[in-house]
Amino acid sequence: GLLALTVACALLGMADPRARTTNSPPASAHRTTGLPPFRQAFRRVIASARQRRLTRAPVPPDAVATWCDAIARRLRSGETLRRVLANERPAHVALSARTDSLRRALDRGASVTDAIATSGAVSGNTSLDLVWSVLAVASDYGGSAAEPIDRTASALRLRSADAHERSAQSAQARLSAHVLTAVPLLVLALLL
């Protein structure tokens, strides 16, 4: 156990200060970078785990519709589709994490169609899949992309409203199912 702890500490830069050689940087060197190396590594691991969690988080259709509205607004002001997609960061955190690959691909010089194909392949969200296909068609065929993106936002809002309506209509049935499931279990526990 002690050997494993020593190896882990040495790998993370937490070795015993008495064991340092004369070539090691002074303690004040850590203040210039802000944090000791083991804390920097720990923060990188935490940030990576957070990014993975955000990428898997569900993205509501309303957030995608709001992003579409912002894209259409900037397109109507005269910006190109490439510039808008590279610079328009969604306000929703999970959506922003899912569209990071699109912005990175555009920054590296990929065409809009290729960047959308790369980002759409890892989407896994029906609302986002609809937006990716509309953006890909708008990029391939040119013309004004603002109108189809506006219609996509309207369709996403309609989907969201339908989902909320279905949830409200089925609330009583779901509550009855929970009660009919819980009551027999409670009675059985009471009888035991």
Image (tube, rainbow, N blue to C red):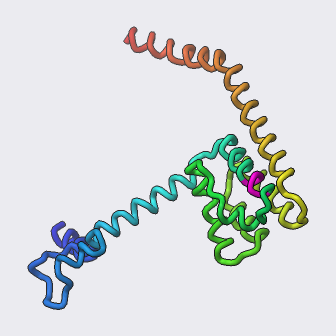
- Residue 89 x, y percent position in the rendering: 62, 57
Q: Residue at x 59, y 48 (%)?
A: 92
Relative to residue 110, is residue 187 drawn left or right? left
- The boundaries of the magenta stretch are 71-75
Work out which residue is located at the far bottom of the displayed protein and give it. Answer: 23
Q: Is residue 112 above or below residue 96?
A: below
Count of labels shown?
0
Indicate yes or no whether the magenta region holds residue 74.
Answer: yes
Q: Residue at x 19, y 86 (%)?
A: 24
Indicate yes or no whether the magenta region holds residue 120.
Answer: no
Relative to residue 132, is residue 181 drawn left or right? left
Decide which of 161, 4 is in the foreground and name it: 161
Q: Is residue 161 above or below residue 101?
A: above
* Magenta stretch, main secondary structure class: helix
Decide which of 140, 55 is in the foreground and name it: 140
- Locate residue 166: give its quadrant: top right
Q: Residue at x 45, y 58 (%)?
A: 49
- Residue 146 x, y percent position in the rendering: 83, 54
Decide which of 71, 95 is in the foreground and name it: 71
Quarter of the picture containing the C terminus is top left
- Locate residue 163: give its quadrant: top right
Work out which residue is located at the far left of the displayed protein and give it. Answer: 18
